[in-house]
Amino acid sequence: MLSLCVLFRTVAGVTPDISAHFRALAIRQLDQFAATQGLRRLMLYLTMGVGDTTPSLSCVAAWPSGAMVLPPAPEDADVQLPEQGRRWLPLRHGGLLLGALLVETEQLPWSAELAARLQAAAECLAQARALDLQILHLQRELEGMERQRQRQQEQLAVLAHQMRNPVAALRTFGQLLLRRMDGDDARRGLVEGLLEEGEQLNRYVDALDTLPAATQLLEQLGEGQALLLPPLPARAEEQPLAERLLPLIQRAAANCEAQGRPWHGPGDLADLPPWCGDVDAVCEVLANLLENAFRYSPPGSAVGLVCQATDDVLQLAVWDGGKPIATAEQERIFARGMRGSSSSGREGSGLGLALGRDLARQLGGDLRWCSLPELAELNPSGDLPDQGNAFLLQLPFVGCKLPGTGQAAQARPPDS
């Protein structure tokens, strides 16, 4: 038991917030003493005071329930006067005093049973108050995070708005340049590639405008069809995979040329067997794999894309001439948020491979790391380096619908 003056010297200032749940619990704790003989009054005081203000004890619950609620203890001369039947039970949590339970009885000493019950009530209220403060603190943190999220969304909206003008200008200049070129100009492909990339950039801006809330984004990354890049506009009919791969290959070749890297692209895409399905999702996966190859392989090392079809599986592999990923990491890097040791100090979220594998499996296939010797069986041209990494995307032909037929494709015979 503590005297009131000692309690005021040792108590620390805490937030004055009190939840309705704690107040209800406090009332129930005090009301349990209603039938106790010799007990005159119970008053629950909590420490109030924020920052540098002088902490004080304010009454938040009383028994009997009709008892007058007293002012803060430092202002209440009655509770500060010596009283034979008055005692203070501190509400302790660790090294912090969160309040005190004032007990007034008609006679002393208390019985051992009453003393034990009062002490148990004080300990219960102390634990409940500590939890209440933690919950209130977390609520304030969540409110602050929500305000920050709203500010970030507003900033993204402004950024998206500011980006639209230069993006539109680039598209206009590219279209004008294309019109002024001859039909057989060898540079037309470069300009068309610029326009294609401009359309992709415009889709990024649209995606910023419709960026989901944080909770929706987590749900999307968990179970939904989360694309690695903004989705392409809806089309009335399926686009052949080879047609969608072409700009991706052109972009990779241009990156290699700009960085002084050897580029090893696939052969004639016209020889690629027709694969039916979500070609946009396939390109999302490959675009991310190519980005990783450029980001994490050493400058000047080769990058390539292999496209091969076996009996009933289309296999697409992106490879690079970097240091092989350690055996212990070859599967771990597909976990969300996990990155290989070679990526230390470089930008990246650790989500690309995990989302890529999710997309591949949603398409009925898979995505995995494979060694270059294993990849050599799919790439007999012999242009693979001595060491490196390959990521193999495998997509089934069986069960997908052939374009324009509405019929499911069957397994391809080996000689087709």
Image: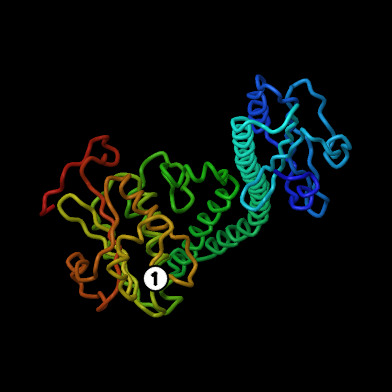
Question: Residue tagged by mark 1?
Answer: 341
Side of 262 relative to 99 (left or right): left
- Give x and y (percent) for residue 57: 78, 41
Q: Nearer the viewer, residue 3 or 168?
A: 3
Q: Is residue 166 above or below residue 373?
A: above
Side of 43 relative to 355 (left or right): right
Rendered residue at 27%/45% (across/down): 364
Q: Is residue 149 above or below residue 32?
A: below
Q: Quadrant of residue 201?
A: bottom right
Q: Is residue 34 above or below residue 334?
A: above
Amino acid type, callout 1: Ser
Side of 353 relative to 373 (left or right): right
Q: Nearer the viewer, residue 160 or 248?
A: 160
Q: Nearer the viewer, residue 9 or 172?
A: 9
- Give x and y (percent) for residue 370: 25, 64
Task: Report the number of numbered marks.
Answer: 1
Rendered residue at 37%/62% (across/down): 289
Q: Quadrant of residue 25?
A: top right
Mark 1 residue crowding within 10 angstroms, few (<14) / some (14–19) / many (20+): few
- Give x and y (percent) for residue 302: 34, 76
Q: Colour mode?
A: rainbow
Rendered residue at 30%/60% (across/down): 331
Q: For the N terminus, which image quadrant?
A: top right
SS label for mark 1: helix
Q: Is residue 47 above or below residue 373?
A: above
Rendered residue at 56%/62% (across/down): 174
- Give x and y (percent) for residue 228: 44, 53
